Image (cartoon, rainbow, N blue to C red):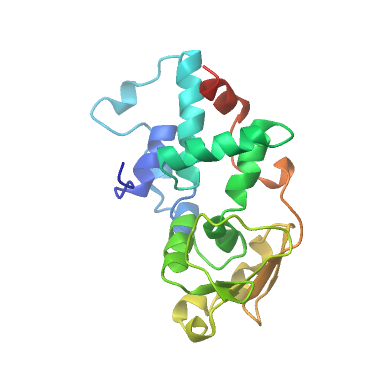
């Protein structure tokens, strides 16, 4: 299946929750979800019926998948790997998603949104532990260092990084002077701010 390229705000409206897919715009008065939060489509305003158990499970899965900008097969394969690890499968899943290369770049403040961070990664603006890396799905490990490539540091895109320093989570450390960040520990469930009932995803894939 091809990646969704339509309006990002339409996704938030469909899921009924703001997923912050467009960075700063989501915090402004221009946010389409603030102005019209009903589901998209001709009959969107009439979709207020109670969801079945399956419907709730599906919506939670779709919400997380879209939050991280993943396709269905990628998401399902990630869940299968999370199931094989020790611990709670749903929490393992969220941790694995948080540790994707593109998401860590976003969490460090090097991208205005996950979508922008993914684009910056694929355009080779970063190094991982001093080596070239341009695959958004690379799983970052504790101790890994992500840095803006030397040739990219003069780009306007990276000139306002200092203003974003306060938004970085506690499991990463960022040096905005050197334009690099390090994963100092693995994120736990309390570090992940996505509004989701992750156990419903486990129930969905257990059907």
- Vertical order, 118 against 177 (above or below): above
Residue 35 in the image: state x and y as whole percent.
Answer: 38, 43
Residue 71 visible to an observer of this rendering = yes
**Which residue is rendered at x = 71% and y = 47% of the image?**
191
Q: Nearer the viewer, residue 44 or 112?
A: 112
Q: Quadrant of the N terminus?
A: top left
**Which residue is rendered at x = 65% and y = 77% of the image?**
176
Residue at the farthest left position:
42
Residue 163 in the image: state x and y as whole percent.
Answer: 60, 72
Hey, which quadrant is residue 140 in on the image?
A: bottom right
Hey, which quadrant is residue 79 in on the image?
A: top right
Q: Is residue 1 left or right of residue 100?
A: left
Q: Nearer the viewer, residue 167 or 137?
A: 137
Q: Nearer the viewer, residue 156 or 88?
A: 88
**Which residue is rendered at x = 71% and y = 41% of the image?**
189
Hey, which quadrant is residue 172 in on the image?
A: bottom right
């Amino acid at each position: 299946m091809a990646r969704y390229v339509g309006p990002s705000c339409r996704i938030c409206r469909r899921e009924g929750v703001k997923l912050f897919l467009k960075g700063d715009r989501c915090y402004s008065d221009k946010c389409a979800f603030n102005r019209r939060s009903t589901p998209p489509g001709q009959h969107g305003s009439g979709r207020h019926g109670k969801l079945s158990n399956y419907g709730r499970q599906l919506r939670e899965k779709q919400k997380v998948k879209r939050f991280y900008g993943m396709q269905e097969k990628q998401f399902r394969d990630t869940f299968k790997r999370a199931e094989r690890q020790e611990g709670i499968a749903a929490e393992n899943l969220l941790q694995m998603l948080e540790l994707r290369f593109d998401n860590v770049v976003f969490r460090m403040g090097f991208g205005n949104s996950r979508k922008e961070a993914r684009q910056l990664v694929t355009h080779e603006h970063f190094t991982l532990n001093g080596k070239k890396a341009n695959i958004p799905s690379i799983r970052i490990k504790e101790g890994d260092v992500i840095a803006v490539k030397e040739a990219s540091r003069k780009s306007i895109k990276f000139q306002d990084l200092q203003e974003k320093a306060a938004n970085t989570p506690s499991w990463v450390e960022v040096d905005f002077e050197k334009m690099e960040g390090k994963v100092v520990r693995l994120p736990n469930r309390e570090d992940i701010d996505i509004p989701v009932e992750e156990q419903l995803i486990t129930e969905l894939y257990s059907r």
